[in-house]
Amino acid sequence: MKKKISILYTGGTIGMIKEGGNYVPAPPGYISEALNGIQELHRSDMPDFTIEEYTPVMDSANMVPKDWVAIGEYIAKNYSFFDGFIVLHGTDTMSYTASALAFMLKNLSKPVILTGAQIPLSELRSDGRDNIIAAAIIAQKFEIPEVCLYFGEKLYRGCRSIKVNASGFGAFASPNYELLANSGIEINVRNDLLLPMPSSDNVFEFIPFATDIMITSIRIFPGISPQLLQEIVSSPIQGLIIEAYGIGNIPESPQLLSIFEEAVKRDILITVCSQCLLGEISLEYYRGGSALQKCGVVNGADMTIEATLAKIMYLFTLKNDIAKKRLLMSKNLRGELSCELYSTLI
């Protein structure tokens, strides 16, 4: 059956043109003309598609949470009219948007695929053409009930993806979760890795983030100043991500620990993630991590920073009490955690 998909162009490198020696967003209508000129998208075995252009188109470095909500709102409003969605997006914050959409779009039964390019469609060697064609093929041929990111012949779970290469075509990785699909001579989707298709009782729901939530992250480094950290936690923040060493280590500093302990008592949701790409947090292993755990911080396990940020925003949007937020932070909600896979869907 020929499916119908919506292509939403939000901006990014894929739709830029060169002007005065720099890449700038092309004028309205350019991306529609460029996509309609790709003959492969019009084959009989490809889905029918419509193109919607975000106004104004944006460099993804300028995106903020209200833009994630706008993209999610577009998908929600058009959910019943299409069999899938492709979001054309800049690479710099694509993983942030993919993670945010994963939490906002509850009980998805259709693919939402983010993609883009490292070289604009206006250039001869653009990778955007292949990325769009492959994303459209996947949307046509496969039943994928989740937010994904397609780039450089690979399909990733959106809330597991991170950008790892600023200049190569293999711009993204999924350090702690296997690829959902490889695009070689054949496109092989790993159905065993996909989120389960929601039952008929679990209808699609759009949960827009509250955009006034104050969250920050701090990367632990040798010689980090307790005074600086105190300034951060004394500000009106609601969530804090600690990027710790290895499996959750921080310096064994009584000052640092007392600051974290005080922040937890003030109901700041603190989550520990690793600076390492691979592996997961184990706070009980070393004394530094164990001390953090005693302070009441949450073990971020193998979540990406992008997914952790989106998850904190989601939990504060739900307005549960802080104890429930801490509990849910450690539960798998959208496939963002390897442990307790698919245990809790809220």
Image: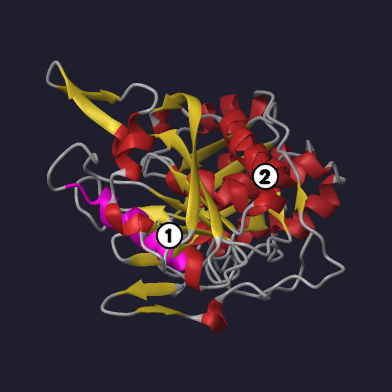
User: Where is 321 relative to 55, above or below?
Assistant: below
SS assignment at label 1 = helix
Quarter in which the C terminus is drawn: bottom right
Q: Residues within 10 Å of mark 2 (few under 14, many from 20)?
A: some
**Residue 15 sits in which quadrant?**
top left
Tell me what residue is drawn at x 24 percent, y 39 percent.
120
Q: Nearer the viewer, residue 102 or 227?
A: 102
Q: Measured from the top left, where is residue 200 in percent x and y?
A: 83, 70
Residue 254 can be seen, yes or no = no
Q: Residues within 10 Å of mark 1 (few under 14, many from 20)?
A: many
Q: Measured from the top left, where is residue 123 in percent x and y?
A: 15, 39
Q: Nearer the viewer, residue 36 or 223?
A: 36
Tell me what residue is drawn at x 50 percent, y 63 percent.
139
* Residue carrying label 1: 136
* Residue carrying label 2: 78
Q: Is residue 58 left or right of residue 241?
A: left
Amino acid at pointer 2: Asn
Q: Measured from the top left, where is residue 82 in percent x and y?
A: 62, 53
Looking at the magenta stretch, what is its main secondary structure? helix
> Alpha-carbon distance for marks 1 and 2?
17 Å
Q: Tell me if residue 135 is in the magenta stretch.
A: yes
Q: Which mark is residue 277?
A: none
Q: Nearer the viewer, residue 311 or 265?
A: 311
Amino acid at pointer 1: Ala
Residue 322 can be seen, yes or no = yes
Quarter in which the N terminus is drawn: bottom right
Q: Which residues are magenta?
A: 126-138
Nearest to N terminus: mark 1 or mark 2: 2
SS assignment at label 2 = loop
